[in-house]
Image: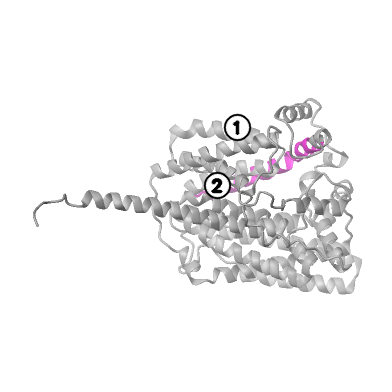
Amino acid sequence: MRAASPSAPKGTPLTGQPPGWLLALLLALIWAYLATATLGLRELLNVANLLGPLALGLSALVAGYRLIRRHPETVWTPYAWFLAAIVLFYSMGPLIYPLAGSRTLAYAQSLAPVDASQLLRTNLLNAVGILALLVGFRIGRAWPRLRNRDAAGMRARSPALTKTVALTFLAIGGVLQYLVILPTQFGLYHLVMPGMIKNLGDLYLLGLMVLAYIVAKGSRAWQLPFIGLWTLQVVTSFLLFSKHQLILSIALPALGAYLAHRRVSHLLAWSLVICVVYFSVGQLVLYGRTQINAQTGDINHATLMQRARIVRTWFQEGMPSANAATSAGATGWARLYYAPQQAFAMNRHDTGQTGHTLRYLDIVLIPRLIWPGKPVISDMGAGFYELVTGRRGSHLAPGIFAEGYWDYGWPGVIGLGLIAGLAFGVLSSLSVGWMRRGAFEYLPGVLLGINMGIVGTTQFFVASIVGATGFFFVYILVVWGVAQTFSGIRLRLARSRLRPPASDHG
């Protein structure tokens, strides 16, 4: 494993920085959106709504590709994955309005219709929020101790320690995943699942990732166990009707293999596979959730037999669509389109109906084990869905940029963006340092950072940024404490072996 990309110039921080030209582009887009809104000409609105997100997406693609090519370790950072989020949610998503066909657009707009003027406001909102986040990232990275951390030398970890970490993750995560979390989702238990348990359940995925790393390093003895466990995980993800879980089940082992061989071409190939899977399983996921909601009144909880029958029926009936629009492939693209909920939240603020989404800020870090009656923070998504649609049955979020506007107007957009960027900067530096040293015991923290980068800005701020950051530091503090304890024990044992035997002579 190499310590750094050969093309990285001396003195360049290995976590990289948002390039100046990307910040300049965002400033130019903000000016262009404001000028277009002032003129109010429909033709200019359509042009701005097409060229603005297109330019932003292409720029983020170029910045991300150059980042990974020069600094391969950044694939483990929230910053790298936020660049992917820009492409998906703030470029491809808004482009559904000017580029999609009428049936696909009608399906995407079924939540709440958005016109060209409202779409322009959401594009302006995204440009301001992204700029604030990237500036916050640069501020967070400016802390000297963090800036110098990623330049630390590589320390080789023994293969035995790596295998121990993999087996530990698989054991702990497997017990939680298959004896607690999945039985709850399959209706065997009726529990309010603490967020900490859900996060610890992801250790199973991280165990698969480290196992993929071991196999890619040439350990043939672990190939069959990896294939069997990975196949079980993929099948389970299908039965959960969760694209997010399925994508993680593919992406994390691919990242583990990439850490071993460092071939960008392989990483790009797996990225293409993930894109194909994302768009191809959309109809099954929507059909499955629709059927579960019809049978149980909830999209998340159904028995294993119910889920298996739904999948079998879907295939037997020729893979039917949940509605007419999905047959045109609208589902996957429409899930990237956040303009309706963003425009709704902005309109609520403008009419004096401000949000209060930060009300759980002071309790989010209190574990449910200590406070069993703590309010369920994820209910905010159900409440917002009901507010937008007038009915219950699903979850929805405006994203942290629209949330900031809903609560505090434009200062809220800038404030939440800066705080999220600061968190991304700190987490990126720590993640790079761990992965360069092969410190796989910190992988759960790395995964939290990756998840924050790719979807954190599309959720509610308290849960996706504050809560995740708090759990990140709690976890690494626990791991550090355990490591220090074992290190002290080993040191005392070593000293006792070196101590000369007691003598009666003076």
Q: Residue at x 43, y 37 (%)?
A: 219
* Label pair 1/2, CB-CB below 8 angstroms: no
The secondary structure type at the circle numbered 1 is: helix
Q: Is residue 63 above or below residue 230?
A: below
Q: What residue type is disc 2 on?
A: Leu
Viewer can see residue 12: no
Instruction: Please indicate whether residue 51 sits to the left or right of residue 445 in the image.
Output: right
Amino acid type assigned to the residue bearing label 1 in the image: Leu
The range drawn in magenta is 262-290
Measured as percent of width and height from the top left, residue 488 is found at 35, 54
Which secondary structure is most common in the magenta stretch?
A: helix
Give the secondary structure at mark 2. helix
Quadrant hosting residue 116:
bottom right
Q: How packed is label 2: few (under 14 Cα within 10 Å), some, or many (20 or more)?
A: many
* Most foreground residue, 43 or 12: 12
Q: Residues within 10 Å of mark 1 (few under 14, many from 20)?
A: few
Observer-side mark, 1 or 2, equals 1
Rendering coords of residue 405 (x, y %): 78, 67
> What label does residue 255 carry, if any?
2
Q: In x, y percent, where is residue 107?
A: 86, 47
Which residue does the numbered mark 1 point to in the structure image? 232
Residue drawn at 88 percent across, 65 percent down: 117
The residue most toward the top is 316
Q: Against 494, is 44 above or below? A: below
On the image, the x and y values in percent for residue 249 come to 61, 41
Residue 312, magenta (yes or no): no
Would residue 224 appear left or right of 275 to someone viewing this image?
left
**Does the image show residue 395?**
yes
Whole-angstrom CA distance, mark 1 to mark 2, is 19 Å
Foreground: 113 or 34?
Answer: 113
